[in-house]
């Protein structure tokens, strides 16, 4: 079963991956204006990384 992240969880993960402020990430995801093309690029890259992480199979640990 695939667990979907809440909006807050997505914001925090993307902020962590991109190094951007969570408030900036939230604004970006809402479609609001975000200053700085570098920040936008980092957030977009982090979104792609998160999508890849979510689509990869979860390893099963036996113990």
Image (cartoon, rainbow, N blue to C red):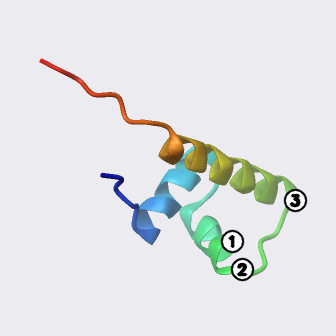
Question: Is 5 or 56 nearer to us in this picture?
Answer: 56
Q: Is residue 15 above or below residue 58?
A: below
Q: Which residue is mark 1?
A: 28
**Is the C-beta separation of discs 2 and 1 under 8 Å?**
yes
Residue 11, image x and y in percent? 52, 63
| Helix, strand or loop at mark 3 | helix
Instruction: Give the labeled residue for mark 3.
Output: 37
Based on the displayed image, in which of its 4 quarters is residue 22 positioned?
Answer: bottom right
Q: Residue at x 54, y 47 (%)?
A: 16
Crowding at dot 3, Cα within 10 Å, few <14 / some 14-19 / many 20+, comes out as few
Query: In what element is the residue under mark 1?
Result: helix
Residue 40 lies in quadrant: bottom right
- What distance separates the C-alpha of mark 3 from that of mark 1? 12 Å
Give yes or no for contact between labels 2 and 3 (Cβ–Cβ under 8 Å). Answer: no
Q: Which residue is mark 2?
A: 31
Q: Is residue 19 visible?
A: no
Q: Which residue of the protein is positioned furthest toward the right in this rendering?
A: 37
């Amino acid at each position: 079963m695939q667990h979907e992240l809440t909006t807050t969880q997505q914001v925090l993960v993307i902020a962590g991956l991109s190094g951007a402020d969570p408030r900036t990430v939230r604004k970006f995801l809402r479609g609001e204006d975000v200053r700085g093309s570098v920040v936008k690029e980092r957030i977009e890259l982090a979104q792609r990384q998160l999508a890849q992480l979510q689509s990869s199979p979860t390893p099963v640990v036996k113990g």
